[in-house]
Amino acid sequence: MSDIFAQITVEELGRRLAESTADRLQLVDVREPHEIELAALPGFEVFPLSEFAEWSDKIADRLDRETETLVLCHHGVRSAQMCHWLLGEGFTNVKNIVGGIDAYSMLVDRTIPRY
């Protein structure tokens, strides 16, 4: 199995979140709770990487392996790590959000605070 995963731009994310089918997306944010307090997008389920041991064995109960899954972090590095891990867990449609919430706040929605 390849560990290459797809990527999505923040502009595409903005379009996808505005579509009527947005509720079919599985949205994952791997940032820390203090980061979520500073800036967050609605609809994202939070799985902080620092708490990996606490949620990793329950991921299959909380997420569907076949559903399109978009993964967010601050700049795109931690979300890429999560994408690799999800693929290893049998997820089939995982996409890293390039540039993370920082790029989203600059290019899509300037009301989202930058930090």
Image: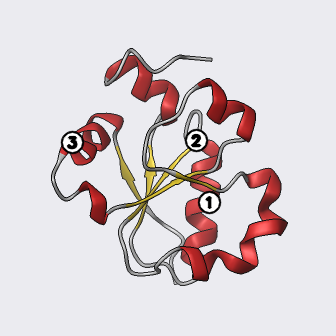
Q: Secondary structure at mark 1?
A: helix
Image coordinates for residue 92, horizontal then vertical, percent: 42, 78
Q: Is residue 46 above or below residue 90?
A: above
Measuring 52% from the left and 17% from the top, which residue is drawn there? 113
The amino acid pointed to by label 3 is: Ala
Q: Are marks 1 and 2 in contact (CB under 8 Å)?
A: yes
Q: Which residue is mark 2?
A: 73
Q: Which residue is mark 1?
A: 82
Q: x%, y% of residue 78?
A: 65, 47
Residue 41 position in % (x across, y down): 45, 37
Residue type, mark 2 in image: Cys
Which residue, given by chain and number where applicable, does mark 3 sit on?
18
Q: Nearer the viewer, residue 77 or 23?
A: 23
Tag 1 or tag 3, which sits nearer the N-term? 3
Question: In the picture provided, is 63 more to the left or to the right than 56?
Answer: left
Q: Pointer 2: residues within 10 angstroms few (<14), some, or many (20+)?
A: many
Q: What's the distance in space between the residues labelled 3 and 1, CA to CA?
A: 24 Å
Residue 42, above or below 59: above
